[in-house]
Image (spheres, helix red, strand yellow):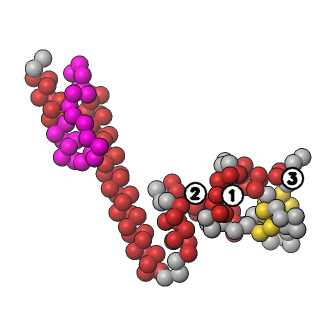
Amino acid sequence: MKSSEHSRPINGDGAVMTIGAVAERFGMATHVLRHWEAMGLVTPARDAAGRRRYGAADLTRIAVILRAKEAGLSLDTIRTLAGTADPVKRREMLQEEAAALRSRIATARYSLELIECALDCDHEDVTLTGVTRHVTAAWATQCARNLLMGLDDT
């Protein structure tokens, strides 16, 4: 058995886990945990031989980082949030992130509406409606109108 597969309890306070065991538990590569450590996001303890040993607090921190990444936060933002003691500043940052997430959700909804419209369209080529890098409600509505107007020609 490799040393990266070992996990041993310490003082009944929980378990100490190796980097390999933690990576396996969260379904991630060990280099990700090393990168997070280099960025200051996690700080596992070290044993006498210098090997990383993750405790319960580290596992909680990793779970929080993963959830924050799922919400679209960058590692830099997560690090800043974790290092900010001022609750007002933290709240302002989270409000900004929430606004950005709402914008991405709105864009995704408009994109979905366009795709669903195209799926319902019997027109031969739905790609002739125009392309933009910045989908907005007005753009999606105009694309849908273009699709419908093109149907009148057939």
The image shows residue 2 at horizontal and vertical percentages of 87, 48
Q: Name the residue beneath numbered marker 3.
A: 3
Does residue 78 appear to the left or right of 141 in the view shown? right
Q: Earlier in the sequence, mark 3 or mark 1?
A: 3
| Image quadrant in which the C terminus is located | top left
Q: Are marks 3 and 1 in contact (CB under 8 Å)?
A: no
**Dot 2: element:** helix
Q: Name the residue beneath numbered marker 2.
A: 66
The image shows residue 133 at horizontal and vertical percentages of 29, 43
Q: Residue at x 58, y 63 (%)?
A: 64
Does residue 106 appear to the left or right of 15 in the view shown? left
Please state the extent of the stretch shown in magenta in the rendering.
120-143
Dot 3 amino acid type: Ser
Does residue 13 appear to the left or right of 101 in the view shown? right
Q: Residue at x 51, y 64 (%)?
A: 76
**Dot 3: element:** helix
Q: Quadrant of residue 91?
A: bottom left
